[in-house]
Amino acid sequence: MYYIYAYDAAAPVDRQLVSISTDGHTASPCIFDSKTVKHAHPQTVCIPKGIDCEKRGPRGILDRLWNLENGWDSYSAPAPVADTIVRARSLVDDLLEHDVSISHIGPSLLGGIGITVDHEGTEFAVEFRNSGKAIVTEITADDDIKIHNLTGCHGPAHEVLAILGKEAG
Amino acid sequence: MFDVPGDMLTNDRGTDPTFAPSEKLYRRFPPEHYKGGMKIPIYAVELPDVSVNRSKHGGKAEYVLYDVVKGTYREHFGIVEFSVGDIPNPIPLENQTRVETKVSHEPELLNYFHSEIQAHDEVRGHLKNIEEDIDEEWVAAWRVKMRRALTVVKKPG
């Protein structure tokens, strides 16, 4: 089940209303900055059900990242693009479904989204980059590092759960 | 013109290339990257080039909240500090050119203390795009070691 977010290309460029259509009715809990949406996707953007900009918790934090613009860090960090947010959102949903506790979600200074999971004394930083690259950096308490490149063959959740030593189920 | 403390103005002061290992450097960071009780996430650690303010010649931590590029005061941002001597130089993998990081004083009209942490190698010189130029292992090592050097001196908010 997906909400369809679409921008109105005929509206003024500075702030176009993004309409949301689902289950035969239209709602508008969020107005996204049109440049972000347009830049990310030429027509429409599909994002998983449950988007609510006012919501707290991992999903709410992630959903608010749609509003970031380039330079959000006050320097020159690129805003996460739509595809990156969608992939991160999918992973977050899957991790929560598998009772994986998420310590932090935030935008990456390299352009993209980072998700931190602390598991059995080890930190796992998942990073979806705007470039399409997806990486898990495993950091032990002694700061030893191991890099895992997510291949995407089985879906990021399957791979991340395997790295965490959990069954995808 | 954006109003900054008089101390920040470069005026006639020249560039000072000398950084002692004990000199403190400061950088502001956005609220999205702070959660009490946990380390700053590694994706919140910038790769070179990193804009910072130096402390030599009277640079204060709070001066980094003056965003002289965008002409705004970043009141809700946090501030981290670290010492020049703690800037990491991760060792690259085999068959890669050694990358050296160094600090360069780059004064701006409204911010004399502005400096940059840059990465250089002997073949390509100043590396402008670390993510593309350098192996992920280097990137991760840099971020983890850099994070270890950071102290939050002002929380966001």
Image (cartoon, grey):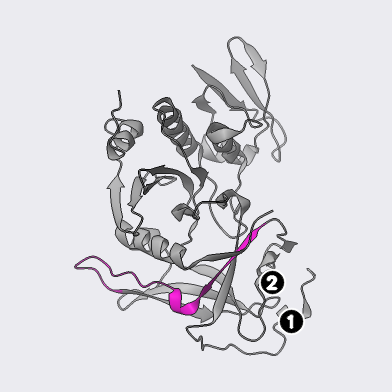
Q: Nearer the viewer, residue B119 or B87?
A: B87
Give the residue at x 65% y 35%.
A32
Choose top left, top right, bottom left or bottom right for residue A11: top right
Residue A68 drawn in magenta: no
Q: Which residues are magenta?
A: B77-98
Report the chain holding disc 1: B
For the residue marked with disc 1, what is the amino acid?
A: Asp
Report the chain holding disc 2: B
Residue at numbered disc 2: B63
Residue B92 drawn in magenta: yes
Judge from the rendering whether residue B97 lies leftward or rightward of residue A46; answer left or right.
Answer: left
For the residue marked with disc 2, what is the amino acid?
A: Tyr
Q: Relative to residue A84, is residue B50 depicted above or below?
A: below
Judge from the rendering whether residue A43 lies leftward or rightward of residue A152; answer left or right.
Answer: right
Choose top left, top right, bottom left or bottom right for residue B128: bottom left
Task: Indicate the secondary structure of the residue bearing disc 2.
Answer: helix
Residue at numbered disc 1: B7
Q: Position of residue A138 (x, y in %)?
A: 33, 50
Give the residue at x 51% y 66%.
B150
Q: Nearer the viewer, residue B37 or B61?
A: B37
Q: Nearer the viewer, residue A110 or A148?
A: A148
Q: Position of residue A66 (x, y in %)?
A: 58, 38
Looking at the image, which residue sits at the far top? A24
Question: For the C terminus of chain A, which image quadrant?
Answer: top left
Give the residue at x 45% y 36%.
A101
Residues marked 1 and 2 touching at CB (< 8 Å): yes
Q: Relative to residue A67, is residue B55 depicted above or below?
A: below
**Pointer 1 or 2: first along the chain:** 1
Q: Position of residue A119 (x, y in %)?
A: 37, 42
For label 1, count other residues whose C-alpha is less than 10 Å away and answer few (under 14), some (14-19) or many (20+). Answer: some
